[in-house]
Image (cartoon, rainbow, N blue to C red):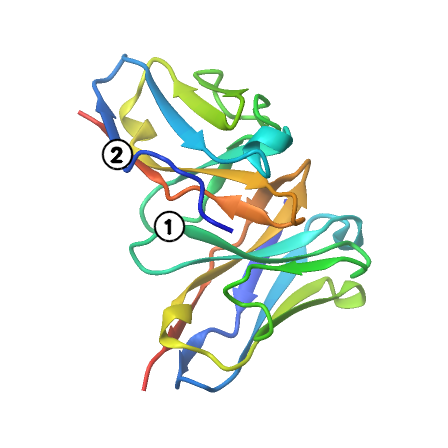
Amino acid sequence: EVQLVESGGGLVQPGRSLRLSCAASGFTFDDYAMHWVRQAPGKGLEWVASIREDSGSIDYADSVKGRFTISRDNAKNSLYLQMNSLRPEDTAFYYCAKDAAWSLDYWGQGTLVTVSS
Amino acid sequence: QSALTQPASVSASPGQSITISCTGTSSDIGGYNHVSWYQQHPGKAPKLIIYEVTNRPSGVPDRFSGSKSGNTASLTISGLQTEDEADYYCNSYTSSNTRVFGGGTKLTVL
């Protein structure tokens, strides 16, 4: 059974940093690209970033480019999102998701990041 | 990276059919067959229901179907059931090697 479990969310002040983790199991992690998607409370989904299987291709939404860094450790079956220079508008549930056939076929339950002073 | 355009809400009665549109550009929907649809119930993670425009993952009822014409993709749900009441999002691959979601459509089954 595929499982994705996010962690690392919490309350952080504007301008500070936070690192999210996503622990994957139930599939061969290094065979698949992975994504981060966020959802502000009561709002729609926003794609944040993606990373290919071998970290050879990484892409970001314009809204986070230069502030967020996606990475993965295939030996640990883990995906990460380093978030720097956080802004109140980054407040959201952050989901990690597995890529398949140009879609996101499995999602974690999300971790809430709140940026507020 | 402008969001794809979806109607904010649709409603229908059980047993009826609805179609949700998702409009993009030639740089996303119009340029690729990499359109997917997601269903999200309140407080839950999104669930993939359509991939590559028309394909249903295992376990998704055949009441759900997808199509595309030009820069617009569509999700049709036939024989509506009360459990179909949820938010629905489209997503497309883009020419910038990114992904973009639609703004979401709230489906109410009256």
Question: Circle 1: is it few (<14), some (14-19), or many (20+) Cα within 10 Å?
Answer: some
Q: Which mark is residue B37?
A: none
Q: In the displayed structure, does residue B18 sit left or right of residue B48?
A: left
Q: Disc 1, disc 2: CB below 8 Å?
A: no
Instruction: Check disc 1 and report its element: helix, strand or loop.
Output: loop
Residue A6, image quadrant? bottom right
Q: In this view, does A15 lie above or below A25?
A: below
- Judged from this view, the residue extending furthest toward the left is B110
In this view, which residue lies farthest toward the front?
B26
Mark 2: which secondary structure? strand
Describe residue A93's horizontal placement relative to residue A55 as left or right.
left
Which chain is disc 2 placed on? B
- What residue did someone put label 2 on? B9
Q: Can residue B51 be seen in this view?
A: no
Picture residue at 78% right of the left edge, 63% below the top: A74
Chain assignment, label 1: A
Q: Which x, y percent locates residue A48?
A: 54, 59
* Residue indicated by mark 1: A44
Mark 2 is surrounded, within 10 Å at the Cα level, by few (under 14), some (14 to 19) or many (20 or more) other residues, namely: few
**x and y, in percent, of residue A23 in the image:** 63, 63
Amino acid type of the residue that numbered disc 2 sits on in the rendered structure: Ser
Is B97 or A25 nearer to us in this picture?
B97
Q: What residue type is labelled 1?
A: Gly
Query: Residue A14 appears in which quarter of the rendering?
Result: bottom left
Residue B61 rendering spot, x and y as whole percentages: 47, 20
Q: Is residue A10 visible?
A: yes
Q: Do labels 1 and 2 share a chain?
A: no
Residue name at image x 58 percent, y 47 percent: B99
- Which image quadrant: the C terminus of chain A? bottom left
Q: Which residue is drawn at 57% across and 25% down?
A: B53
